[in-house]
Image (cartoon, helix red, strand yellow):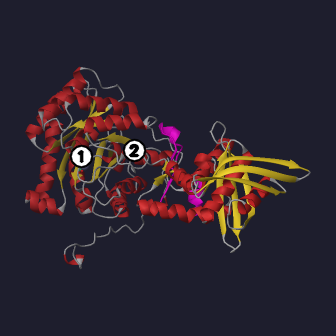
Amino acid sequence: MLKNPSSKYQPFPLITLPNRQWPSRHLSKAPIWCSVDLRDGNQALAVPMNVSQKLEMFDALVKCGFKEIEVGFPSASNTEFNFNRRLIEEKRIPEDVTIQCLVQAREDLIEKTVESLLGAKKVVIHMYNSTSPAQRKYVFGKTKEEIIAIAVKGAQMIKDRLHRLESTGTQVTLQYSPESFSATEVEFAKEISEAVMDVWQPTPEKKMILNLPDTVEVAMPNVYADQIEWICTNIKNRESLIISLHTHNDRGTGTAATELGLLAGADRVEGTLFGNGERTGNLDIVQVAMNLYMHGIAPELDFSNMGSLIHMYERTTGMTVPPRQPYAGELVFTAFSGSHQDAIKKGLSGYEEHKSIWDVPYLTIDPEDIGREYREVIRVNSQSGKGGVAYLLESEFGIELPKDMQREFGPIANDLVDKLGREVTAAELRDMFWKEYIERNTPFSLHHFHADGVDGVFTCRSSMVKNGSEIGITGTGNGPIAAFVQGLIKDGGAQPFEVVTYREQSLEAGSEASAISYILIKLATGKTVWGAGVDTNIELASIKAVVSAVNRAI
Ligand code: KIV
Ligand code: ZN
């Protein structure tokens, strides 16, 4: 990369729009949607869709509720032409759906496009030519006047052929795109669009679509919004136009550009499912629709079964939906962080109670609305604090470590995770806990324990193995634990210690070990050590916890 990029790249010029209105507007209804999956999306595939894949996608788009679908570029290939013919001849297009076809301003291509549409009920013929300074200079080598002449000629050639469709009952809407609009001077975009309007003569009753493409995203989305508002304000006969947006995502702001473009006065949006399209893709129409939905605005597109839509998309295009794609990605409704999981849990139970406005932290929408589920990924890494470790043991296994014990086990777990060099699952964390506390059987391991109490004085007998040899222990105290501690020091040779804290809890019903005890001991040196034991018998669980602590202290 260059140290001084200004030697090669320049800022995008701003639009003079002193009284801009869009920043203080808000969106209150869905735009007219047009899917361009079968054309713009398709042309960007390594292997373009065949006719049967296109048919499958067409049906899926109809099912989502698209009423305008750009089905292809029928003059570009036989597949595209045949696809139109099958749609029409097999009567696959619902009454309320309009198919749209793209064509360049060339007579042979226009002729073929018209032929491909014969017999359809409702069509949009979409003509484009490119208008930006770079396109004029490098690609066409033509002046502005010559570029306008291309558009006007093409518009006339289409107009001359309309009777062939209209005489057989086809309703035709005309669409013009000054391709590379966002990189074109607004004044020139207006001039060329008005020249096309002069030919097509749209009226408020029979509007034409003026599509203003962000063919390559070259500026911030506020600039695109300014360009749209500038056109909406300055173009003649605005009331005879449907202003349409067609954004790509080169700077990663296709969605923002579209939303601001709608604020700026546009009526219609072209885009693709999940943003498939040239380079960084077209606008992801799902995102804009779902953004409206999360603000309580009916998007008039139905993504209730996002999972099956994704499968259809992946099957037909060979593309994949990235795991973090807004709304659709595999991980969108998955929480990894313990604090997020905790907040979501609380938010979900709050929502369950009030069942009114969705206000669950970290979840923009209820995943169930689009056929998805909230999921927690429970695991820790070496950076997870003691709280994360404790949360995981508690939420997954019901192990409620005392606070002080969390302070001891947290760093131990983090060290182990660090050594592994990866994140660990809840089950792995539980194994670490088991190894560290429950399975600490050396030098002492308990074979048998029995205690009796008379008038508050308890006597215990225990057999143990110490360093591989069997030993017997007896002791007395004011409880079974105290008796065992006394015996372990006296007969077992354990270094002197006292029990500081003792806690027990039952574990989930059905588990083999139904009780767990946590014991903190303090050695004569002042050192404190935790131990833990599990057993179906709560008394034995606590004796095992003492053994665990003593073993860990050595
Ligand atoms: O991106 C674009 O400009 C296009 C046009 C053909 C509308 O796809
Ligand atoms: Zn495009």
Indicate whether 504 appears above or below 10: above
Q: Tell me the crowding category of disc 1: few under 14, some 14 to 19, or many 20 or more residues within 10 angstroms, Cα based.
A: many
| Secondary structure at numbered mark 1 | strand
| Secondary structure at numbered mark 2 | helix
350 sits left or right of 308 in the view: right
Count of labels shown? Answer: 2
Whether residue 383 is visible, yes or no, is no
Indicate whether 30 appears above or below 336: above
* Residue denoted by label 1: 176
Whether residue 221 is visible, yes or no, is yes
* Percent of width and height locating residue 397: 60, 46
Q: Nearer the viewer, residue 118 or 383?
A: 383
Residue that appears at 46% across and 54% down: 424
Residue that appears at 19% across and 74% down: 8
* Percent of width and height locating residue 170: 25, 27
20 sits left or right of 536 in the view: left
* Percent of width and height locating residue 407: 62, 65
Q: Which residues are magenta?
A: 365-391
Q: What amino acid is labelled 1 in the image?
A: Tyr
